[in-house]
Amino acid sequence: MKRFLLIALLLAPVCGAADLALTPPMGWNSWNKFAEKVDDKTVREVADAVVSSGMKDAAYVYINIDDSWEAGRDAQGNIQTNSKFPDMKALADYVHSKGLKIGIYSSPGPKTCADYEGSYQHEEQDAKTWAAWGIDYLKYDWCSAEKVYKPSDMQAVYKKMGDALKATGRPIVYSLCQYGLQNVWEWGASVGGNLWRTTGDIEDNWKSMSTIGFDKQTGHEKYAGPGHWNDPDMLEIGNGGMSAPEYRTHMSLWAMLAAPLLAGNDVRDMSDATRQILLNKEVIAIDQDKLGRQGRRVSKEAGAEMWMRPLENGDLALAFFNRTESMVTVTAYWEILGLKGKHKVRDLWAHEDLGSFRDAYSAQVPVHGVVMLRVAR
Ligand code: GLA
């Protein structure tokens, strides 16, 4: 018993705040669609829409304000909001009244990436201010910190804010945003991080999304788990730069990666296609699987990729992706997946049980599209 307690105590600091982000965080973030145009009214309307669209019931709970809410500081050094956000505490209360949580953004540097006030030399003070407002999530973006710190300072700089957040006593999800520098996956959890960006910024096009999702996550799998996740960046689904099959690939791939699912579109005004993609509960269930094991690529042949993710109940999530410009057929041989005999297969986009298959399952995959399956043990 004593030994168990000791092990638990030793592990505690590595795992970040207890009970936070036990599955990848889900919600909405303002940046991809609104950038600096976000304001109090938009955030309230987005919170309303997250509830009325069914997104809240599907587990999208964090409403995250990205860069551009900040003004300067008062005489005591307290961070001020600009005229777009007249009363952050009132806004947080409103978001909480909907049963949702609210997130905010800052930088360890003097300025944020969009040149607003950062938290440099005000870390504890800002953490206290956010906690007093009722903030539940912080995205902390390196930006101008590169002008005042050396790259080798990065861990200590992120730990400083991680400690400051913990000291507030309020559970605040801590999102590290430094684009994968310094192999952040190796130390992100130890500074209190619940998620860390693995790459530069995503853009709303196939090349950006597919390069980040398929090519830049491999090798980081072992660092993800309950409480601490690799973050391939926010979703672009519904922003208009990709086709429906491409957005289904985006959603499926992020679910296979156990990635945070932060919608980045205008959820007040969603097409049916966008709604169906963001609200596919069977795909969300893969992303949110409690085992928390990040999926990985099993095979790659001329632009056809097969990915696998083990699930808590022993099932396997399987995804066939097509990165080529023509239809491909992909076959999953059970043997390669460590399976034998007959297994039931369910299609998570068609919402259909396909039957039981012996030895293998094959499917045709449309251009830039996906076939996502759940294979029962
Ligand atoms: C960086 C981040 C983006 C966004 C902007 C805001 O580019 O990577 O996600 O937060 O800053 O300025």
Image (cartoon, helix red, strand yellow):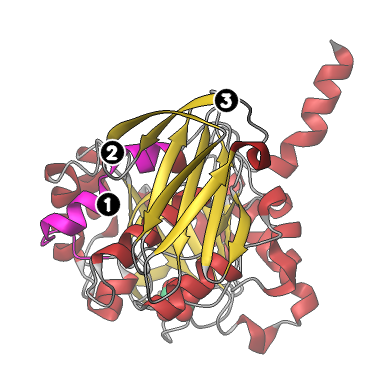
Decide which of 321, 251 is in the foreground and name it.
Answer: 321
Mark 1 and ligand 1: say if the CB distance to the nearest ligand atom is below 8 Å.
no
Q: Considering only order in the chain, which callout, 3 or 1, is on the residue closer to the N terminus?
A: 1
Q: Is mark 1 on a helix, strand or loop?
A: helix
Q: How crowded is mark 2: few (under 14 residues within 10 Å), some or many (20 or more)?
A: some
- Dot 2 corresponds to which residue? 58
Give residue 86's quadrant in the image.
Answer: bottom left
**Callout 1–callout 3 Cβ contact below 8 Å:** no
The amino acid sitting under disc 2 is Ala
- Dot 3 corresponds to which residue? 314
Mark 2 and ligand 1: say if the CB distance to the nearest ligand atom is below 8 Å.
no
Q: How crowded is mark 3: few (under 14 residues within 10 Å), some or many (20 or more)?
A: few
- Dot 1 corresponds to which residue? 278
The amino acid sitting under disc 3 is Gly
Residue at (59, 24) in percent of width and height? 341
Q: How crowded is mark 1: few (under 14 residues within 10 Å), some or many (20 or more)?
A: many
Q: How far apart are marks 2 and 3 (CA)?
A: 23 Å
Indicate which label's residue lies in the foreground, 1 or 3. 3
Q: Where is residue 189 in the image (x, y as percent from the top left)?
A: 68, 50
- Magenta stretch: residue 51 in it? no
Decide which of 266, 19 is in the foreground and name it.
Answer: 266
Write down the region rendered in magenta. Answer: 265-285
Residue at (73, 35) in percent of width and height? 12
Relative side of 135 to 331, left or right:
left
Q: Position of residue 195 (x, y in %)?
A: 57, 54
**Callout 1–callout 2 Cβ contact below 8 Å:** yes
Q: Is mark 2 on a helix, strand or loop?
A: loop
Give residue 302's quadrant in the image.
Answer: bottom right
Q: Quadrant of the C terminus?
A: top right
Q: In this view, does 80 lie above or below 294?
A: below
